[in-house]
Amino acid sequence: MNEVIKKNGIKFGVITGAISVLMSLTFYLVDIKLFINPWLGFGLILLYLAIGIYQLIELKKDLNGKMPFKEAFTGYFYSAVIGITISTLFSILLFNVIDTEARDLITENLITYQAEQLQKWNVPSEAIKQTIKDMKDNPQFTIGGLTKGYGFSLLGAAIFGLILAAIMKSKTNPLNE
């Protein structure tokens, strides 16, 4: 891997990982219910997307304006893997070693929130019961749940990375080649 891409990926991966850890700590210390706030989750996704765009702008500068699709995607995804790994490892440590009661409390709040939302949408009670059963059988903040979430996060990052790389890549002009 190109050293410029690697250095850029590590720098921004650590930045996003640190932001994720700080946000998790803030939610944990302020109010555990913040973990299930969809607006905060959406806001964090937008923040990470903005950081990814900035990262690719910086990478393009570091590559002297010549950033093919492959380099753009590789740089973004390398950073995402580092950031998501830091975040997931911290969550595993926090919720499965340090404070398992917080994990269980978040799960209870998440189930309650989901049931209330489904009721608002007039989902049949049998479907709500099944959703609650599935959530209890597959809690999100256990090691298994966080590992599954890690995989989905990587998939989401790959999709964002493909889109951003397509947008941010250097434009080639066949007449100048």
Image (cartoon, rainbow, N blue to C red):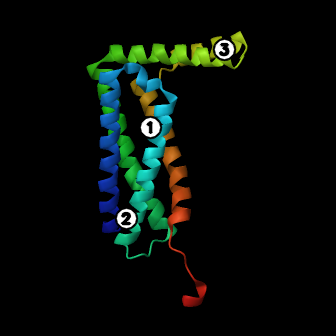
Q: Above or below — where is 127 with respect to 175?
A: above
Q: Is mark 3 on a helix, strand or loop?
A: helix
Contact (CB < 8 A) between labels 1 and 2? no
Residue in front for this viewpoint, 1 or 111: 111
Question: What kind of element bears circle 2?
Answer: helix
In which image quadrant can residue 100 be found? Answer: top left
Q: Residue 142: which quarter of the image?
A: top left
Residue 58, label in figure = 2
Is residue 137 shown to the viewer in this render? no
Whole-number angstrom distance, CA of label 2 to CA of label 3? 46 Å
Residue 58: x percent and y percent? 37, 64
Q: Is residue 14 above or below residue 4?
A: above
Which of marks 3 and 1 precedes in the sequence? 3
Query: Which of pointers 1 and 2 indicates the residue nearer the eye?
Result: 2
Observer-nearest residue: 88 or 118? 118
Chain-order first, disc 2 or disc 3: 2
Total label count? 3
Task: Please identify the quadrant where the N terminus is shown.
Answer: bottom left
**Rendered residue at 65%/18% (across/down):** 118
The residue labelled by disc 1 is: 150
Q: Which badge, 1 or 2, comes first in the chain's sequence?
A: 2
| 4 horizontally vs 118: left or right | left
Say above or below: 110 vs 170. above
Tag of residue 119: 3
Task: Name the amino acid, label 1.
Answer: Tyr
Which residue is at a point 52% across and 58% down the rendered structure image? 164
Give me the C-alpha separation between circle 1 and circle 3: 29 Å
2 and 3 marks in contact (CB < 8 Å): no
- Tell me which residue sits at (39%, 48%) in the image: 81
Q: What residue type is labelled 3?
A: Gln
The percent coordinates of residue 72 (x first, y second) are 46, 64
